[in-house]
Image (cartoon, helix red, strand yellow):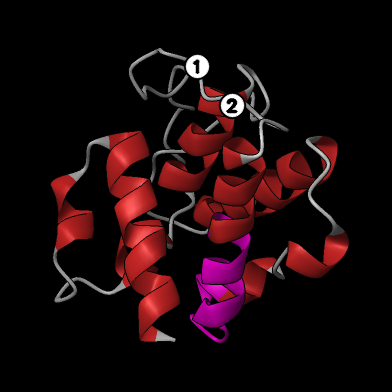
């Protein structure tokens, strides 16, 4: 729903500093669809949770989303709050993605996870697919 999306956008803005999250005119699927922002979020919680973030604009974006979901499991996010990668990649269930982001936020708020003070940067990008 719109309220949950607003809270998720505010959290992602806070964590990433990416001002595109301020503007509802840019769909979340566009901002999150390649998985890069989500992978960076997990790496702020625990460095190296997602060891490789693919930066190319191709099918390997789905790999980022799969790696993010796997990282969520490793950090103790219950399965019911982990979306299917295609939910985001194809935009089929953005509500599930928003619920996941808000669950990560709640884990941080409750002290179960802690954001590092590091600037939200990615590990070295993987080589683009030929």
Mark drawn on residue 116: 1
On screen, residue 129 versus residue 49, left or right, reads: left
Question: What secondary structure is found at the residue carrying circle 1?
Answer: loop
Quadrant into which the C terminus falls: top left
Residue 45 — which label? 2
- Report the front residue among 109 and 16: 109
Label annotation for residue 4? none
Whether label 1 touches label 2, CB < 8 Å: yes
Query: Is residue 77 found left or right of 56 in the rendered image?
Result: right
User: In whole angstroms, how far apart are the C-alphas of marks 1 and 2?
Assistant: 6 Å
- Residues shaded magenta: 88-101
Q: Main secondary structure of the magenta part?
A: helix
User: In this view of the protein, can residue 130 be seen by the observer?
Assistant: no
Can the viewer see residue 50 in this picture? yes
Query: Label 2's element?
Result: helix
What residue sits 33% from the left and 60% below the top? Answer: 9
x 44%, y 43%: residue: 36
Q: Is residue 67 above or below residue 82?
A: above
Decide whether residue 56 is among the magenta residues.
no
For the point 36% across and 84% down, the residue is: 2
In the displayed orientation, state which residue is furthest to the top. 118
């Amino acid at each position: 729903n719109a309220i949950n999306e607003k809270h998720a956008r505010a959290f992602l803005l806070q964590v990433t500093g990416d001002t595109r999250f301020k503007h509802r005119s840019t769909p979340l699927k566009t901002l999150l669809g390649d998985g890069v922002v989500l992978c960076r979020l997990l790496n702020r919680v625990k460095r190296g949770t997602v060891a490789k973030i693919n930066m190319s604009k191709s099918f390997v974006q789905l790999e980022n989303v799969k790696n993010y979901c796997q990282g969520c499991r490793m950090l103790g996010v219950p399965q019911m709050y982990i979306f299917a990668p295609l939910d985001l990649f194809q935009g089929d269930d953005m509500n599930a993605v928003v619920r996941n982001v808000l669950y990560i936020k709640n884990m941080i708020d409750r002290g179960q996870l802690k954001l590092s003070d590091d600037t939200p940067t990615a590990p070295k990008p993987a080589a683009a697919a030929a």
